[in-house]
Image (cartoon, rainbow, N blue to C red):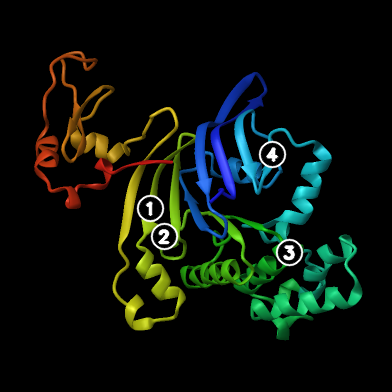
Amino acid sequence: MEAFIQCENLVKIYKVAELEVVALQGLDLTVQRGELLGIVGTSGSGKSTLLNILGGLDRPSAGHVVVNGRNLLKAPDAELDTYRRREVGFVWQQTARNLIPYLSAQENVALPMTIAGMGWKEKRAWTKELLEAVGLWEHRQHKLAQLSGGQQQRIAIAVALANKPKLLLGDEPTGELDSTTAQEILALLREMNGRYNLTTLIVTHDPQIARAVDRVVTIRDGRTSSETIKRVADVEAALAGNVEAAAPTPVYEEYVVVDNAGRLQIPPDLREASGIGDRVTLEATEEGVLIKPVVSENGRGGETAVSPQAEQLSTEPNNKSPWWQRWRRG
Protein backbone atom coordinates (compact mmCIF):
# COMPACT_ATOMS: atom_id res chain seq x y z
CA MET A 1 0.00 0.00 0.00
CA GLU A 2 1.33 3.43 -0.99
CA ALA A 3 2.30 5.58 1.98
CA PHE A 4 0.32 8.77 2.65
CA ILE A 5 3.51 10.61 3.72
CA GLN A 6 6.95 9.74 2.38
CA CYS A 7 10.05 11.70 3.44
CA GLU A 8 13.47 10.64 2.20
CA ASN A 9 16.77 12.31 3.12
CA LEU A 10 14.91 15.50 4.08
CA VAL A 11 17.16 18.50 4.71
CA LYS A 12 16.22 21.96 5.96
CA ILE A 13 18.77 24.73 6.45
CA TYR A 14 17.87 28.12 7.92
CA LYS A 15 20.14 31.11 7.44
CA VAL A 16 20.28 33.41 10.48
CA ALA A 17 22.42 36.49 9.80
CA GLU A 18 25.72 34.97 8.63
CA LEU A 19 25.07 31.60 10.23
CA GLU A 20 23.45 28.52 8.73
CA VAL A 21 21.36 26.36 11.06
CA VAL A 22 20.67 22.80 9.94
CA ALA A 23 17.26 21.84 11.34
CA LEU A 24 16.82 18.56 9.45
CA GLN A 25 19.79 16.43 8.45
CA GLY A 26 18.62 13.69 6.11
CA LEU A 27 15.39 12.71 7.87
CA ASP A 28 13.47 9.65 6.64
CA LEU A 29 9.83 9.06 7.59
CA THR A 30 6.94 6.97 6.28
CA VAL A 31 3.36 7.42 7.50
CA GLN A 32 0.46 5.26 6.31
CA ARG A 33 -2.96 6.63 5.45
CA GLY A 34 -5.17 6.88 8.55
CA GLU A 35 -2.27 6.51 10.99
CA LEU A 36 -2.14 8.44 14.27
CA LEU A 37 1.52 9.28 14.85
CA GLY A 38 3.26 10.99 17.75
CA ILE A 39 6.54 12.84 17.18
CA VAL A 40 8.78 13.56 20.16
CA GLY A 41 12.23 15.02 20.67
CA THR A 42 14.13 17.69 22.54
CA SER A 43 13.86 21.39 21.67
CA GLY A 44 15.75 22.09 18.47
CA SER A 45 15.59 18.50 17.23
CA GLY A 46 13.57 19.45 14.13
CA LYS A 47 10.03 18.41 15.15
CA SER A 48 8.26 21.68 14.36
CA THR A 49 10.33 22.16 11.21
CA LEU A 50 9.09 18.81 9.95
CA LEU A 51 5.49 19.75 10.75
CA ASN A 52 5.81 23.08 8.92
CA ILE A 53 7.14 21.31 5.83
CA LEU A 54 4.38 18.68 5.86
CA GLY A 55 1.79 21.44 6.28
CA GLY A 56 3.09 23.41 3.31
CA LEU A 57 4.16 26.33 5.50
CA ASP A 58 7.82 25.89 4.63
CA ARG A 59 9.86 24.20 1.91
CA PRO A 60 12.71 21.77 2.49
CA SER A 61 16.19 22.69 1.29
CA ALA A 62 16.74 19.27 -0.24
CA GLY A 63 15.41 15.73 -0.23
CA HIS A 64 12.09 14.17 -1.17
CA VAL A 65 8.72 14.81 0.51
CA VAL A 66 5.40 13.58 -0.89
CA VAL A 67 2.04 13.92 0.89
CA ASN A 68 -0.99 12.18 -0.61
CA GLY A 69 0.75 11.99 -3.97
CA ARG A 70 1.77 15.68 -3.97
CA ASN A 71 5.47 16.57 -4.19
CA LEU A 72 5.83 19.45 -1.72
CA LEU A 73 9.41 20.24 -2.77
CA LYS A 74 8.53 20.96 -6.39
CA ALA A 75 4.93 22.24 -6.04
CA PRO A 76 4.40 25.86 -7.21
CA ASP A 77 3.39 28.44 -4.60
CA ALA A 78 -0.23 28.55 -5.85
CA GLU A 79 -0.49 24.77 -5.52
CA LEU A 80 0.88 24.92 -1.96
CA ASP A 81 -1.72 27.57 -1.08
CA THR A 82 -4.50 25.29 -2.33
CA TYR A 83 -2.97 22.36 -0.47
CA ARG A 84 -2.94 24.27 2.85
CA ARG A 85 -6.53 25.49 2.46
CA ARG A 86 -8.13 22.24 1.34
CA GLU A 87 -6.08 19.30 2.58
CA VAL A 88 -4.45 20.27 5.90
CA GLY A 89 -5.81 21.16 9.32
CA PHE A 90 -3.64 22.74 12.04
CA VAL A 91 -3.96 22.73 15.83
CA TRP A 92 -1.41 24.94 17.58
CA GLN A 93 -0.35 25.18 21.21
CA GLN A 94 -1.19 28.89 21.51
CA THR A 95 -4.90 29.71 21.49
CA ALA A 96 -4.20 32.96 19.63
CA ARG A 97 -3.06 30.96 16.59
CA ASN A 98 -6.19 28.81 16.60
CA LEU A 99 -9.08 31.10 17.45
CA ILE A 100 -10.31 34.70 17.18
CA PRO A 101 -11.21 35.94 20.70
CA TYR A 102 -14.08 38.30 19.79
CA LEU A 103 -15.96 35.58 17.85
CA SER A 104 -18.19 32.94 19.42
CA ALA A 105 -17.30 29.26 19.28
CA GLN A 106 -19.75 28.74 16.41
CA GLU A 107 -18.44 31.76 14.48
CA ASN A 108 -14.84 30.55 14.87
CA VAL A 109 -15.71 27.16 13.39
CA ALA A 110 -17.79 28.65 10.57
CA LEU A 111 -15.18 31.25 9.54
CA PRO A 112 -12.97 28.92 7.42
CA MET A 113 -16.10 27.65 5.66
CA THR A 114 -17.18 31.22 4.87
CA ILE A 115 -13.74 32.00 3.42
CA ALA A 116 -13.94 28.82 1.31
CA GLY A 117 -17.32 29.92 -0.07
CA MET A 118 -19.36 27.09 1.42
CA GLY A 119 -23.15 27.43 1.12
CA TRP A 120 -25.20 28.57 4.14
CA LYS A 121 -27.06 25.29 4.73
CA GLU A 122 -23.94 23.14 4.33
CA LYS A 123 -21.94 25.49 6.55
CA ARG A 124 -24.53 25.40 9.35
CA ALA A 125 -24.87 21.61 9.20
CA TRP A 126 -21.10 21.00 9.19
CA THR A 127 -20.52 23.52 12.01
CA LYS A 128 -23.14 21.80 14.15
CA GLU A 129 -21.70 18.36 13.45
CA LEU A 130 -18.18 19.45 14.41
CA LEU A 131 -19.26 21.20 17.61
CA GLU A 132 -21.29 18.14 18.61
CA ALA A 133 -18.32 15.90 17.78
CA VAL A 134 -16.08 17.84 20.19
CA GLY A 135 -18.88 18.00 22.79
CA LEU A 136 -19.44 21.78 22.77
CA TRP A 137 -22.62 22.44 20.77
CA GLU A 138 -24.32 23.77 23.90
CA HIS A 139 -21.48 26.33 24.24
CA ARG A 140 -21.71 27.51 20.64
CA GLN A 141 -22.58 31.12 21.57
CA HIS A 142 -19.79 31.49 24.13
CA LYS A 143 -16.79 33.72 23.53
CA LEU A 144 -13.30 32.41 24.31
CA ALA A 145 -13.18 34.20 27.68
CA GLN A 146 -16.16 32.09 28.78
CA LEU A 147 -14.44 28.80 27.92
CA SER A 148 -11.76 26.84 29.78
CA GLY A 149 -8.40 26.03 28.20
CA GLY A 150 -9.52 22.50 27.38
CA GLN A 151 -12.76 23.74 25.82
CA GLN A 152 -10.84 26.27 23.72
CA GLN A 153 -8.61 23.50 22.42
CA ARG A 154 -11.69 21.43 21.55
CA ILE A 155 -12.99 24.38 19.55
CA ALA A 156 -9.56 24.63 17.90
CA ILE A 157 -9.83 20.99 16.78
CA ALA A 158 -13.26 21.73 15.29
CA VAL A 159 -11.79 24.74 13.45
CA ALA A 160 -8.94 22.56 12.13
CA LEU A 161 -11.53 20.15 10.68
CA ALA A 162 -13.71 22.88 9.15
CA ASN A 163 -12.09 22.51 5.70
CA LYS A 164 -12.55 18.71 5.79
CA PRO A 165 -8.80 17.99 5.65
CA LYS A 166 -7.10 14.69 4.93
CA LEU A 167 -4.09 15.56 7.13
CA LEU A 168 -4.33 16.91 10.69
CA LEU A 169 -1.19 18.39 12.27
CA GLY A 170 -0.93 19.20 15.97
CA ASP A 171 2.04 21.22 17.27
CA GLU A 172 2.08 20.76 21.07
CA PRO A 173 -1.76 20.80 21.25
CA THR A 174 -1.63 19.84 24.96
CA GLY A 175 1.34 22.00 25.95
CA GLU A 176 -0.68 24.52 27.98
CA LEU A 177 -3.09 22.05 29.59
CA ASP A 178 -3.01 20.10 32.84
CA SER A 179 -2.33 16.37 32.59
CA THR A 180 -5.97 15.27 32.91
CA THR A 181 -7.23 17.69 30.26
CA ALA A 182 -4.27 16.83 28.03
CA GLN A 183 -5.27 13.17 28.06
CA GLU A 184 -8.84 14.15 27.15
CA ILE A 185 -7.60 16.18 24.18
CA LEU A 186 -5.39 13.32 22.98
CA ALA A 187 -8.35 10.95 23.28
CA LEU A 188 -10.47 13.39 21.25
CA LEU A 189 -7.79 13.58 18.55
CA ARG A 190 -7.81 9.79 18.33
CA GLU A 191 -11.61 9.79 18.06
CA MET A 192 -11.55 12.42 15.28
CA ASN A 193 -8.79 10.50 13.51
CA GLY A 194 -11.02 7.45 13.22
CA ARG A 195 -14.34 9.21 12.67
CA TYR A 196 -13.18 11.37 9.75
CA ASN A 197 -10.54 9.04 8.27
CA LEU A 198 -7.69 11.44 8.99
CA THR A 199 -3.96 10.96 8.95
CA THR A 200 -2.79 12.70 12.14
CA LEU A 201 0.66 13.79 13.34
CA ILE A 202 1.10 15.20 16.84
CA VAL A 203 4.31 16.91 17.97
CA THR A 204 4.52 16.89 21.75
CA HIS A 205 6.66 16.71 24.89
CA ASP A 206 3.93 14.75 26.69
CA PRO A 207 5.52 11.47 27.91
CA GLN A 208 2.08 9.82 27.87
CA ILE A 209 1.69 10.26 24.10
CA ALA A 210 2.50 6.59 23.47
CA ARG A 211 -0.75 5.58 25.18
CA ALA A 212 -2.83 7.69 22.79
CA VAL A 213 -1.28 7.00 19.38
CA ASP A 214 -0.43 4.07 17.13
CA ARG A 215 3.27 4.84 16.89
CA VAL A 216 5.79 7.28 18.35
CA VAL A 217 8.79 8.50 16.35
CA THR A 218 11.70 10.15 18.16
CA ILE A 219 13.69 12.79 16.30
CA ARG A 220 17.23 13.55 17.42
CA ASP A 221 19.58 16.02 15.71
CA GLY A 222 17.35 16.36 12.67
CA ARG A 223 16.98 12.64 11.97
CA THR A 224 14.54 9.94 12.99
CA SER A 225 16.23 8.10 15.83
CA SER A 226 13.80 5.49 17.16
CA GLU A 227 10.16 4.50 17.04
CA THR A 228 7.88 2.96 19.64
CA ILE A 229 4.92 0.83 18.56
CA LYS A 230 2.04 -0.22 20.77
CA ARG A 231 1.09 -3.88 20.43
CA VAL A 232 -1.74 -4.12 17.87
CA ALA A 233 -3.98 -6.24 20.09
CA ASP A 234 -3.99 -3.54 22.79
CA VAL A 235 -4.80 -0.78 20.29
CA GLU A 236 -7.70 -2.73 18.82
CA ALA A 237 -9.05 -3.61 22.26
CA ALA A 238 -8.97 0.03 23.36
CA LEU A 239 -10.65 1.20 20.16
CA ALA A 240 -13.36 -1.43 20.53
CA GLY A 241 -14.07 -0.22 24.05
CA ASN A 242 -13.28 -3.61 25.54
CA VAL A 243 -12.43 -2.50 29.07
CA GLU A 244 -11.37 -5.92 30.31
CA ALA A 245 -9.07 -6.49 27.36
CA ALA A 246 -7.59 -2.99 27.53
CA ALA A 247 -7.08 -3.00 31.30
CA PRO A 248 -3.63 -4.72 31.37
CA THR A 249 -0.63 -2.46 30.95
CA PRO A 250 -0.01 -2.05 27.19
CA VAL A 251 3.14 -3.58 25.73
CA TYR A 252 5.39 -1.23 23.75
CA GLU A 253 8.21 -2.23 21.43
CA GLU A 254 10.94 0.31 20.74
CA TYR A 255 13.15 0.11 17.66
CA VAL A 256 16.21 2.01 16.52
CA VAL A 257 15.50 3.37 13.04
CA VAL A 258 18.04 2.63 10.32
CA ASP A 259 17.89 5.26 7.56
CA ASN A 260 18.38 4.73 3.83
CA ALA A 261 22.13 5.27 4.18
CA GLY A 262 22.39 2.56 6.86
CA ARG A 263 22.85 5.04 9.74
CA LEU A 264 21.32 4.57 13.16
CA GLN A 265 21.37 6.62 16.36
CA ILE A 266 22.12 4.85 19.61
CA PRO A 267 20.57 6.82 22.52
CA PRO A 268 23.16 8.70 24.63
CA ASP A 269 22.29 6.93 27.90
CA LEU A 270 22.76 3.53 26.24
CA ARG A 271 26.06 4.58 24.67
CA GLU A 272 27.35 5.70 28.04
CA ALA A 273 26.16 2.56 29.83
CA SER A 274 27.73 0.34 27.17
CA GLY A 275 31.04 2.25 27.00
CA ILE A 276 30.54 3.15 23.33
CA GLY A 277 32.77 5.99 22.15
CA ASP A 278 33.21 7.21 18.58
CA ARG A 279 33.84 3.75 17.06
CA VAL A 280 32.29 0.29 17.28
CA THR A 281 32.69 -3.08 15.61
CA LEU A 282 29.80 -5.05 14.15
CA GLU A 283 29.61 -8.82 14.34
CA ALA A 284 27.04 -10.96 12.54
CA THR A 285 25.58 -13.63 14.82
CA GLU A 286 22.74 -16.12 14.53
CA GLU A 287 20.55 -13.74 16.53
CA GLY A 288 21.33 -10.60 14.51
CA VAL A 289 24.05 -7.93 14.59
CA LEU A 290 26.18 -7.51 17.74
CA ILE A 291 27.56 -4.02 18.42
CA LYS A 292 30.81 -3.89 20.41
CA PRO A 293 32.60 -0.77 21.69
CA VAL A 294 36.20 -0.20 20.61
CA VAL A 295 38.62 0.60 23.44
CA SER A 296 42.01 2.27 22.92
CA GLU A 297 44.33 4.63 24.75
CA ASN A 298 43.42 7.65 22.63
CA GLY A 299 39.77 6.65 22.27
CA ARG A 300 39.95 6.52 18.48
CA GLY A 301 40.34 2.88 17.67
CA GLY A 302 42.51 -0.02 18.74
CA GLU A 303 41.85 -3.40 20.27
CA THR A 304 38.28 -4.60 20.36
CA ALA A 305 37.04 -5.24 23.86
CA VAL A 306 33.70 -6.80 24.65
CA SER A 307 31.95 -5.00 27.49
CA PRO A 308 29.85 -6.92 30.05
CA GLN A 309 26.79 -5.55 28.30
CA ALA A 310 27.95 -6.94 24.96
CA GLU A 311 28.66 -10.34 26.49
CA GLN A 312 25.15 -10.38 27.89
CA LEU A 313 23.70 -9.45 24.50
CA SER A 314 25.37 -12.35 22.76
CA THR A 315 23.88 -14.92 25.12
CA GLU A 316 20.28 -13.68 25.22
CA PRO A 317 17.62 -15.62 23.32
CA ASN A 318 16.34 -13.97 20.14
CA ASN A 319 12.81 -13.42 21.41
CA LYS A 320 14.15 -11.54 24.44
CA SER A 321 16.81 -9.45 22.72
CA PRO A 322 16.84 -5.80 23.83
CA TRP A 323 15.35 -3.14 21.60
CA TRP A 324 18.70 -1.81 20.36
CA GLN A 325 19.36 -5.18 18.65
CA ARG A 326 16.11 -5.12 16.70
CA TRP A 327 16.91 -3.25 13.52
CA ARG A 328 14.08 -1.71 11.54
CA ARG A 329 14.45 0.26 8.34
CA GLY A 330 12.53 3.52 8.52
Q: Give the residue at mark 2.
A: 210
Question: What secondary structure is found at the residue carrying circle 3?
Answer: loop
Q: Position of residue 161 (x, y in %)?
A: 71, 65
- Give the SS element for disc 2: helix
Disc 1 and disc 4: Cα gap in Å? 27 Å
Residue bearing mark 3: 164
SS at badge 4: loop
Q: Camera-side residue: 98 or 169?
A: 169
The residue positioned 59% from the left and 58% from the top of the image is 199
Pointer 2 local density, CA inside 10 Å: few below 14, some 14–19, many at least 20: many
* CA separation in Å, label 1 and label 2: 8 Å
Q: Are marks 1 and 4 in contact (CB under 8 Å)?
A: no
Report the side of 286 relative to 206 (left or right). left
**Residue ID for mark 4:** 72
- How far apart marks 4 and 2 lie (CA) works out to 28 Å
Q: Say whether marks 1 and 2 touch (CB < 8 Å).
A: yes
Q: Closer to the N terminus: mark 2 or mark 3? A: 3
Mark 1–mark 3 Cα distance, whole angstroms, equals 29 Å
**Which marked residue is nearer to the observer: mark 2 or mark 3?**
3
Which amino acid type is marked by label 1? Thr
Q: Which mark lies nearer to you, 1 or 2?
A: 1
Q: Nearer the viewer, mark 4 or mark 2?
A: 4
Residue at the image position 16 percent from the left and 38 percent from the top: 286
Q: Horizontally, is 59 left or right of 263 in the view? A: right
Q: Is residue 91 visible?
A: no
Q: Quadrant of the C terminus?
A: top left
| Mark nearer the N terminus (1 vs 3) | 3
- Amino acid carrying label 4: it is Leu
- Where does label 1 land, which residue? 228
Kind of residue at disc 2: Ala
